[in-house]
Image (spheres, grey):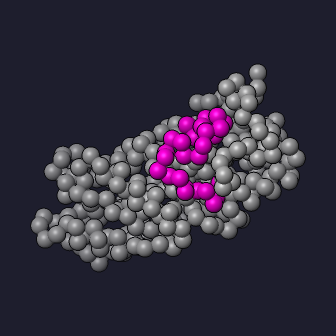
Amino acid sequence: MTTSPALLIAGHGTRDEGGADALRALVRLLAERHPEVPVAGGFFGAPASPLPLSDAVDGLVERGADRLAVIPLLTAPTGPVPEALPTVLARASERHPGLTHVCGAELGPHPKLLDVLERRLDQALGSGARKPADRARTTVLLVGHGATDPYANAEVARAARLLWEGRGFAGVETAFVSQAAPDVPAGLDRCRALAGAGEPGRIVVLPYFLLPGGPVERLHMQAEGWAAAHPGTDVFGATVIGPEPEVADVIMERYRAAVAGEPPFASAPCGCRAAAEDARQPHGAAWQGASLTAGAGDR
């Protein structure tokens, strides 16, 4: 029987211990649910990360892995970044001759992640989100990381539209922590304008992030500053998606698609540009170094 390729979860750019702990929890969850698949995770793009991706690769190789299916732990693509994922993986191949890898799609916006986001909204609002009338006066500000690549930012806008559809909120606006407009205060201004002059509105600031970290702390600080300057508007802060079972399910869906050799984003046809610069070769998700998709059905 052919051994399953190892699953490598590639988070991006955190030096935050809370984010590292959340990724460790996600790795443990996947290992418990899928003991047949070796799994590890780490971060690229952050030299001082407490959980480097290179260490995760080395650990999988020590456990006997010679094939990796790499899943970017991203809700949306990063755009061009220093120390991008292909660079880290190329160095890993140099350290471990014979090691091959394939990269799958990032996670969002997947229906299961949208369900978790809705749960985070309800948690932020408490019992005041249950009735249709309460939701109808609530505007959501979905906040992404932000990138210089407009296609990456468009993925956040797409998630906002999908989150709004059929859930009864007054609207879902977007903002970004850095590198893109509108920023969080400007996004809150837009949400306040949507509320109009009628009943005082309320806004939920919803991080479109899988793990905690510095950018999430910054967006909450910006939201708190805006709320202090606008006492007539209720502003609630939601938490990140976190290491939920739904996240593990989406990761395994991406893993199976990558191992089966499906074209990138076969399960998310609207995201053709997502993470292309970060995680994949420009012409598809072929195994690097050799064609090793044969035997994928033996996992």
Q: Is residue 218 visible?
A: no
Q: Is residue 116 left or right of residue 171?
A: right
* Residue at 74% from the left image edge and 30% from the top image edge: 294
Magenta residues, as a range? 253-279
* Residue at 82% from the left image edge and 50% from the top image edge: 93
Snapshot quadrant of residue 26: top right
Snapshot quadrant of residue 52: bottom right
- Quarter of the figure with the N terminus: top right
| Vertical comparison of 179 with 112: above or below | below
Which residue occupies the foreground of this view, 177 or 288?
A: 288
| Vertical comparison of 174 with 179: above or below | above
* Residue at 86% from the left image edge and 52% from the top image edge: 95
Which residue occupies the foreground of this view, 33 or 78?
A: 78
Q: Is residue 296 visible?
A: yes
Which residue occupies the foreground of this view, 254 or 230?
A: 254
Give how far across and how far down residue 177 sits, in percent.
47, 69
